[in-house]
Image (spheres, coloured by chain):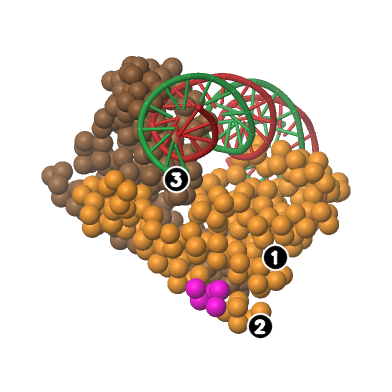
Chain colours: A brown, B orange, C red, D green
DNA sequence: AGACAATACATCGTCGGCGATGTATTACGA
DNA sequence: TCGTAATACATCGCCGACGATGTATTGTCT
């Protein structure tokens, strides 16, 4: 997930680590903070894999900066990860939001719609958090107020997302014809 | 998170690992599947920490079962984790839902309300996923349709959750007087 | 002159999650 | 009778996340 976000930010423009960190924090830091000790090893991994290159520049205000630039492989890798996200990237909202944040980097409207359709299929499956045997329980059937809250919130999210997905898919389908 | 859910399920009744796994899968498996290779080590950790005990029983249909029972320390630990969840447990929806799923095990309505208030404080902070400088952008201000989707969905969730939180806190406050 | 915050990067050790793989047993249908 | 699915548990090794800690520079406030 971190890696996807790094590739996504660098797809637009080269950045140094510190700036990258600020952008990652703005993107999802309020939900899941990014530790520096997670970011720098991740940059190293991506560099080792040939997805990005660094050039050292004298620091503008402090220590020397390592400016990070995506390589062609890196750009291809991002498009690949966006076009064919792992199952978890589609089902887990945190990961899914990261995919959405950078999905515009897929240049093909059809490919973008295909990704949205995967999420649509997931949301259309009848699933709950709580069951009676095999039957999913609705908010009204749950006594525990906290569990009812979970279902109420999940339903609101699901409705909003379904209608957004359907609209957006329709508009992408229209555009790609 | 896994540990919290294990403690939460066992708080009600002793279970063997396989049954526990099915309940964990029902709870959050559609979002984040639970690998067996994650569950069994987690059980071991909790046992080692003295939070649960096992007794071996002949298997009803197959291999012998290890029935898991919470110890008094385990029960106390769960209440502690619920009463004072880590920051991530409050901000990350996946973790937060797990807290909610078991919050009824806190017997004090005041303590329950205090936990909900932490989430309320988090949701009331002005935060976005996308910024122009320091200013959070609203859905209307974002051109990218996918990013607009993120904000639209997040707003719907946030609204539903805020109204649920306020209602539920009020009702808990009423009950504890 | 000294303290402190911000900038900028890095390593180490630990811990948790996970895919792959292994081991039994029971039940059921081909 | 043979394969397969379900039940039930377990280990190994890798990888990623993270807290703690370290290093160095620049600008600002006191």
Q: Quadrant of the N terminus of chain A?
A: top left
Q: Which residue is mark 1?
A: B105
Residue under label 3: A29
Q: Which residues are magenta?
A: B166-170
Residue under numbered circle 2: B177
Give the mark toward the camera: 1 or 2. Answer: 2
The Cα–Cα distance between marks 2 and 3, rounded to whole angstroms, is: 38 Å
Q: Is residue B168 magenta?
A: yes
Residue B45 sits above or below residue A121 on the image: above
Number of numbered discs visible in the structure rendering: 3
For the point 48% across and 43% down, the residue is A33
Q: Is residue B2 magenta?
A: no
Q: Residue at x 39, y 26 (%)?
A: A62
Q: Quick one: quadrant of the C terminus of chain A?
A: top left
Residue A156 is drawn in which quadrant? Answer: bottom left
Could you say which is closer to the camera, residue B134 or residue B150?
Answer: B134
* Disc 3 residue crowd, few under 14, some 14–19, many 20+, Cα 10 Å: some
Looking at the image, residue B101 sits to the left or right of residue A83; the answer is right
Q: Please, what secondary structure does the residue beneath circle 3 have?
A: loop
- Where does the image place residue A76, in percent across and percent down from the top left? 30, 25
Q: Give me the chain letter of mark 1.
A: B
Q: Are marks 2 and 3 on the same chain?
A: no
Q: CA distance from mark 1 to mark 2?
A: 19 Å
Task: Tell me the CA gap for discs 3 and 1.
Answer: 30 Å
Q: Where's residue B19, x and y in %?
A: 70, 52
């Amino acid at each position: 997930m971190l890696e996807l976000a790094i590739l996504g930010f660098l797809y637009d423009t080269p950045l140094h680590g510190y700036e990258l960190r600020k952008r990652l924090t703005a993107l999802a830091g309020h939900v899941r903070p990014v530790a520096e000790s997670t970011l720098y090893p991740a940059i190293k991994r991506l560099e080792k894999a040939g997805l990005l290159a660094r050039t050292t520049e004298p620091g503008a205000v402090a220590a020397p900066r390592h400016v990070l630039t995506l390589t062609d492989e890196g750009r291809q890798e991002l498009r690949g990860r966006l076009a064919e996200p792992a199952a978890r990237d589609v089902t887990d909202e945190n990961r899914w939001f990261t995919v959405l944040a950078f999905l515009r980097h897929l240049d093909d409207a059809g490919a973008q719609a295909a990704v949205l359709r995967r999420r649509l299929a997931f949301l259309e499956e009848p699933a709950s958090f709580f069951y009676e045997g095999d039957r999913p329980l609705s908010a009204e059937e749950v006594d525990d107020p906290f569990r009812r809250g979970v279902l109420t919130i999940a339903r609101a999210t699901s409705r909003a997302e379904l209608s957004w997905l359907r609209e957006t898919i329709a508009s992408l389908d229209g555009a790609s014809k």
